[in-house]
């Protein structure tokens, strides 16, 4: 499948509403965990790309290698990044950090809620579902544990799609949708930054 057909297939898949079987299977698919690995590795790779872009290095080839080896997606890049490569590197770092932090936090919510009885000092008296441990575990396990288990893969999928779209626009050979991809990335980073304020105050 060529690059244009691959991009079109991803776009069609992104517009399709998943069925309940697909939602239930998504946490256990290989592609879900490949995307999780991509989100982890994208942070140090993006940071590395900043000095690389400033000296005119092969930012596109680095991103192509990461994407092809982890996600298994082909990615044709321009020979030279130039100023656009610098813009990409500076935009990719905050986006990669936000993507990693948000998805890592969501997976953390899954673990702490499914393992609610193992929390240190966990008194269920005033907790949701209390006063019994069984009731508190049921509420936390179903709402926070199972709920986020089904939701988090789709959040990771969205972030991965945004990161690859940014790379397509700024580093890709055709460079279509460059401004839109950059604007979307900046907007998502800004919104996630604003939403993180009340969450940080609760910690």
Image (cartoon, rainbow, N blue to C red):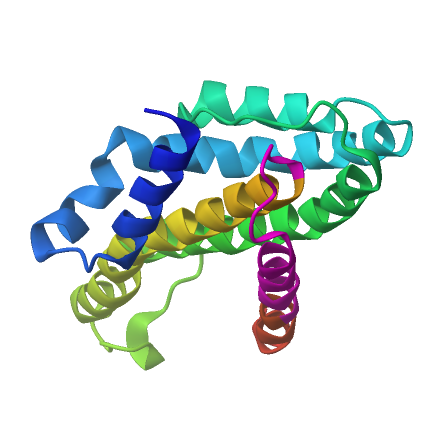
Q: Residue furthest bottom?
A: 126
Q: Residue 62 in magenta?
A: no
Residue that appears at 91% across and 27% down? 55
Q: Position of residue 169 (x, y in %)?
A: 60, 45
Q: Position of residue 3 (x, y in %)?
A: 43, 30
Taking depth in this image into account, of 106 and 137 the one nearest to the observer is 106
Quadrant in which residue 71 is drawn: top left
Residue that appears at 60% across and 70% down? 196
Residue 78 vs 88, above or below: the answer is: above
Point out the stretch of residues depicted in magenta: 171-190
Residue that appears at 31% across and 53% down? 14
**Could you tell me if residue 153 is visible in this image?**
yes
Taking depth in this image into account, of 102 and 76 the one nearest to the observer is 76
**Could you tell me if residue 117 is visible in this image?**
no
Quarter of the picture containing the C terminus is bottom right
Q: Position of residue 179 (x, y in %)?
A: 65, 58
Magenta stretch mostly in which secondary structure? helix
Taking depth in this image into account, of 80 and 70 the one nearest to the observer is 80
Q: Horizontal placement of 108 versus 24: left or right? A: right
Q: Horizontal placement of 44 versus 159: left or right? A: right
Residue that appears at 32% across and 24% down? 1
Q: Residue furthest right?
A: 55
Taking depth in this image into account, of 8 and 23 the one nearest to the observer is 8
């Amino acid at each position: 499948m060529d690059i244009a057909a691959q991009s079109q297939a991803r776009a069609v898949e992104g517009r399709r509403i998943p069925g309940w079987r697909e939602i239930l299977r998504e946490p256990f698919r290989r592609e879900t965990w490949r995307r999780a690995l991509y989100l982890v590795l994208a942070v140090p790779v993006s940071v590395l790309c900043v000095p690389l872009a400033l000296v005119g290095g092969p930012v596109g080839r680095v991103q192509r290698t990461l994407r092809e080896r982890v996600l298994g997606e082909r990615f044709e890049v321009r020979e030279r990044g130039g100023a656009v490569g610098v813009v990409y590197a500076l935009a990719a770092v905050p986006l990669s950090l936000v993507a990693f932090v948000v998805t890592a936090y969501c997976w953390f919510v899954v673990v702490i809620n499914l393992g609610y009885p193992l929390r240190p000092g966990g008194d269920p008296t005033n907790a949701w579902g209390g006063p019994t441990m069984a009731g508190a575990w049921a509420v936390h396990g179903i709402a926070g544990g199972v709920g986020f288990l089904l939701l988090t893969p789709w959040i990771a999928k969205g972030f991965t799609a945004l990161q690859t779209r940014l790379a397509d626009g700024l580093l890709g050979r055709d460079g279509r949708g460059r401004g839109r991809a950059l604007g979307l990335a900046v907007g998502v980073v800004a919104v996630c930054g604003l939403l993180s304020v009340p969450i940080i105050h609760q910690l």
